[in-house]
Amino acid sequence: MKNIIKMFCAGLCLVNFAYAVTITPSIQPASCLKNCIATIDPATPQQAAPGTTVNFKIQVNQSGYPNLTFSQPIIAQDNLSQTKNPIYCENSIVKDNGTGYTLTVIAPNHNCVLNVTVMGTYQLPSPPGSLVYNADSNGNLWFTEPFANQIGVFSPSTENITQYPVAGTGGPANLINGPNNSSTLWFNEMNRSALGSIDLNGNVKQYSIPGLRAAPNLITLGADSNLWFTETAEAGGQFGKFDLSTYETSKYIIPAGVFDVFAMTKGPDNNLWLIFKIKSFEVAKIDTTGTTLKIYPLPEPFDYGITAGNDGNLWIMEGSGDNTSQIGVMTPTTGTIKQYPIQGNVIFTNNQIISAPPGSNNLWFTGLMNGNQGAIFSITTSGTITAYQVPSITEAPVGITFDQNGNLWYITQYPNMIGVL
């Protein structure tokens, strides 16, 4: 009998060992830039039987940023790309224990990585519209406040916010740096036919754009170091150039029948690329004389954003109209597109897609997960997509930008805040 029990115990132990999975904790540095450490305990891989629970404790220690508010730990999602490497632990419960957080992970039937991010945010005085980093202003972040008719400046080193009024009720919308990241930033006004500039001392100048209802709705800096803009559908779907040396405006006609222009960027080939819609979405390649060189059809019914990647391609945010989304990669010389589906219910609510700083070929974009959770996403050139939830419900970040140290900053509306990933 004793031998039978020993044999049974040995067999049971083997079964338990065979079904044990490994949970590997991984925590990103807490997002308060410096003097800030996020720790996870235990920090070593843990083994558990599927269905059982493992507890991890999260602590955040920071100094020097008394106004910073930390979000509860955010768990990376696994269901966003066809390439699932690593597989993230998704079944977890987050609880505030008063001095930190406790994560209770339910072990799945496979090995997984517990990828944790802790974000810090600052409150903004009004809903922001656009965000840009300016290296010439002591590393400050500049943002528009379209509903308050102001330009705001956030200093990460002092945690202070400075606001500069913009005359009238035009509503400064998009904000970009001038040529060579100069000491002047440029913006468009969404409610009037005007462009504007602001220097690092907060001096604002405004320039009228000729034409009825010619309110510029997108702006970008061209390879010719001039400001290029698009106009609303009511103005006839035109685009124009604002010469930064003469302050004169030239206008050009997009192909007849254009309903609206949805996105614009300077391409890796130094041409301008515009996404527009006639009956379906298309993308036009335009040189800096305003000549349309080529028009390519786009495969999806909705295309929201476009940017030049560090890999020499164009990256496009695509939607199918049924809460499914893709990221498309276009070769500028041929117009051919390769698509990377985003698995799960992810929708785009704005046209924010940007390249990582030089040294990385990743792209970053914003959207909503499951229809109600704001998130920032990264995608590699091989199509691997990772999501980072932000502390915002029902709103995706409306602006993202990198600073000179490679930190990714973002702004959201409702709640109005600025944070760093």
Image: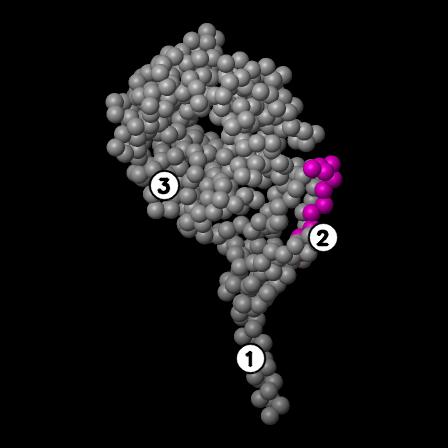
Type of the residue with mark 3:
Gly
Q: Is residue 157 left or right of residue 78?
A: right
The residue most toward the top is: 246
Find disc 3 in the rendering and name its residue.
319
Residue drawn at the location 55% of the way across and 55% of the way down: 113
Q: Secondary structure at mark 3?
A: strand
Q: Earlier in the sequence, mark 2 or mark 1?
A: 1
Residue holding disc 2: 99
- Mark 3 to mark 2 CA distance (whole Å): 42 Å
Query: Which one is nearer the viewer's eye here, 239 or 107?
Result: 239
Q: Nearer the viewer, residue 409 or 149?
A: 149
For mark 3, does the 10 Å Cα neighbourhood hold few (<14), some (14 to 19), or many (20 or more) residues?
Answer: many
Q: CA distance from mark 2 to mark 1?
A: 43 Å
In the picture, measured across the screen, residue 110 lies left or right of residue 44, that is left
Q: Would you call the spot at circle 1 few (<14 residues within 10 Å), some (14-19), or many (20 or more)? A: few
Q: To which quarter of the image does residue 154 belong?
A: top right
Label 1 or label 3, whichever comes before in sequence order: 1
> Which residue was labeled with disc 1?
11
Which residue lies at the image location 34% right of the left edge and 43% below the top edge? 321
What segment is highlighted magenta in the picture?
57-67
Image quarter (top left, top right, bottom left or bottom right) of the N terminus: bottom right
Q: Nearer the viewer, residue 270 or 93?
A: 93
Whether the residues at callouts 3 and 2 have beta carbons within 8 Å, the answer is: no
Vertical order, 177 against 418 (above or below) = above
